[in-house]
Amino acid sequence: MITRPDTRATLYVVGNINVDLIMSTLHAWPKKGTEAMLESSSLRPGGSAGNCALALSALDVPHRLVANQGNDQFTGWLAGLFPESAPHWPTCDCETSLTFGVTHPDHERTFFSNQGHIVRLSMQDVLAQLPENAQPGDWVLLCGTWLCTALYADYPQLLSALRTRGYRVAIDSGWPPEDWSDTLRTQAAQWLPFCDALLLNEVETLGLADAQTLDAAAQKLLAQMAENAFCVAKCGPDGARLWSTDQALHQHAGPVEVVDTIGAGDSFNAGFLSALIYGLPPATALQWGVRVAGCAISSSPRRYPDWQSLFGLVEKL
């Protein structure tokens, strides 16, 4: 019988939550002024922060989703899916952020998004939803960096405030809509010194570092990050890799039948940071991240591993 240890730590997930409308399958772009019928559709909560919070709820890990909300027909529905977090969200007088995606025959997807409420999330909104003093082991995960434009304008000040309050900080910035540039890299250099864990996918890691190999990218980014930080690259079918000042780890992914890849990296974040919330080492965190992501992308409706199976991995180490 596996007994889950107690923890006083909490993971606070900050950033973009929106409505996702995913439709399949678009075989060819329709001509202007015509109509196309697709076989299936799915309306669900989305956004990097939203996907991560859903995984954390399924894993029963202490957490709170720190966000804001719009003021339209989607507001109550989205809030109802996060009943413990939504009462703390400020309301903006605007439409809810919405992403419409279509799936192509090769399983690639094209996404269209409005701006909505996520571009209005502010540093004051975030700090008002967080305790003034962190408990030992508390983490804050910042998601959707380039999409939460009002929040990003104050990123250096926000991260400095979080560190002052005693939080450890993880960031999953995602891919910038305007693509990588020297200007964005210069901006990132202002907040990377406050970052304890960078959780990007492979191409994002290379793009942010402006490097040709993951090893070179990780070393370049670690040199700019906080002391004892982790740089993690999510590598899809190849699992995930982690670098710190004294180790380099690679967790391979087992074979899975891929059903739905949306939110794979967000599910990884939930598993990885859950292990850290319980005080487990980076090697275990990589295992948990890969396991949770593998479960998520191979299931429909989406499912996640239970905590007993995750802690079972600890006993095998």
Image (cartoon, rainbow, N blue to C red):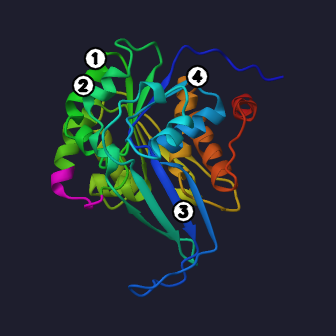
Residue assigned mark 4: 278
- Left-right relation of 190 to 25: left
Residue assigned mark 3: 22
Main secondary structure along the magenta-highlighted residues: loop
Quarter residue 271 falls in: top right
Residue 10: image location, x then y, percent: 50, 21
Quarter residue 223 falls in: top left
Kind of residue at badge 1:
Thr
Q: Is residue 7 above or below residue 227?
A: above
Q: What is the CA distance from the residue labelled 4 to the residue labelled 3? A: 34 Å
Residue assigned mark 1: 164
152 in the magenta segment: no
Residue name at image x 68 percent, y 54 percent: 254
- Contact, mark 2 vs mark 1 (Cβ under 8 Å): yes
Residue at disc 2, secondary structure: helix
Residue assigned mark 2: 160
Residue at disc 3, secondary structure: strand
Q: What is the CA distance from the residue labelled 4 to the residue labelled 1? A: 22 Å
Q: Give neighbour class at mark 1: few <14, some 14-19, many 20+ (Cα, 10 Å).
A: few
- Left-right relation of 161 to 12: left
Query: Looking at the image, can residue 47 be seen?
Result: no
In the rendered structure, which segment of residues is drawn in magenta?
177-184
Residue 266: image location, x then y, percent: 51, 45
